[in-house]
């Protein structure tokens, strides 16, 4: 047997093992972030949000920052699904719009300030999310609309403390 043939056989075995591992991990699926309901503590139930602003929040934020993720087809492929589950977990730990109304007014003000900063700095939505979700690519006008609503809401909370 030549060394080229031996390398080819080893390469095929490695590929076969990797294929088996890839198929096996497809059966290890993360839990889905789907509650199927809008909570009374949802930001949309807590505050009067204009339809155009709510659409932007829903399209750009809710998949990672609520209890209802709209999963793309590729979330069924592991390990991509694991990475998405981790992003959602981390996103909800930062802010969960489904539970926003349960936060203290002081905490809501802080979260709104943070959201404004993230939008201004182009840090949110995440660049990878924007790449795969065209509806999350906010124009400057959309960012301004969101920031104005955030400021007005934050200011009204500050006055009512």
Image (spheres, helix red, strand yellow):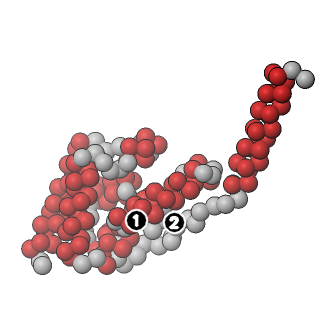
Q: In the rendered view, does 91 fall on the left or right side of 149?
A: right
**Res 33 label:** 2
SS category of the residue bearing label 1: helix
> Which is nearer the eye, 10 or 42?
10
Q: In the rendered view, does 40 fall on the left or right side of 29?
A: left
Where residue 126 appears, as percent x and y from the top left, is 38, 48
Look at the picture and state if 99 lies above or below 59. Answer: below
- Nearer to us of marks 1 and 2 is 1
Task: Tell me the quarter of the image containing the C terminus.
Answer: bottom left
Task: Tell me the quarter of the image containing the N terminus.
Answer: top right
Q: Can residue 126 be spotted in the picture?
A: yes
Where residue 121 appears, as percent x and y from the top left, is 24, 46
Look at the picture and state if 10 lies above or below 100. Answer: above
Where residue 127 appears, as percent x and y from the top left, is 38, 43
Where residue 144 appears, as percent x and y from the top left, is 20, 49
Q: Residues within 10 Å of mark 2 (few under 14, many from 20)?
A: some
Look at the picture and state if 8 lies above or below 122. Answer: above
Assess whether mark 2 and mark 1 are in contact (beta carbons under 8 angstroms).
yes
Q: In the rendered view, does 89 fall on the left or right side of 54?
A: right
Quadrant of res 50: bottom left
SS category of the residue bearing label 2: loop
According to the picture, the residue beneath numbered tag 1 turns out to be: 92
> Which is nearer the eye, 42 or 113?
113
Q: Residue at x 32, y 60 (%)?
A: 54
Q: Residue at x 77, y 44 (%)?
A: 17
């Amino acid at each position: 047997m030549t060394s080229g043939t031996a390398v080819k056989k080893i390469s095929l075995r490695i590929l076969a093992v990797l294929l088996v591992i890839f198929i096996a991990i497809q059966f290890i699926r993360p839990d889905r972030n789907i509650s199927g309901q809008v909570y009374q503590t949802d930001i949309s139930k807590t505050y009067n949000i204009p339809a155009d602003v709510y659409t932007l929040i829903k399209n750009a934020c809710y998949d990672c920052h609520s209890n209802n993720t709209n999963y793309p087809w590729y979330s069924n492929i592991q390990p991509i699904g694991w990475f998405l589950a981790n992003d959602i977990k981390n996103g909800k730990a930062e802010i969960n719009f489904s539970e926003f109304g349960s936060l203290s007014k002081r905490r809501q003000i802080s979260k709104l300030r943070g959201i404004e900063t993230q939008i201004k700095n182009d840090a949110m939505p995440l660049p990878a999310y924007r790449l795969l979700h065209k509806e999350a690519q906010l124009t400057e006008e959309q960012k301004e609309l969101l920031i104005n609503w955030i400021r007005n809401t934050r200011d009204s909370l500050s006055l009512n403390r």
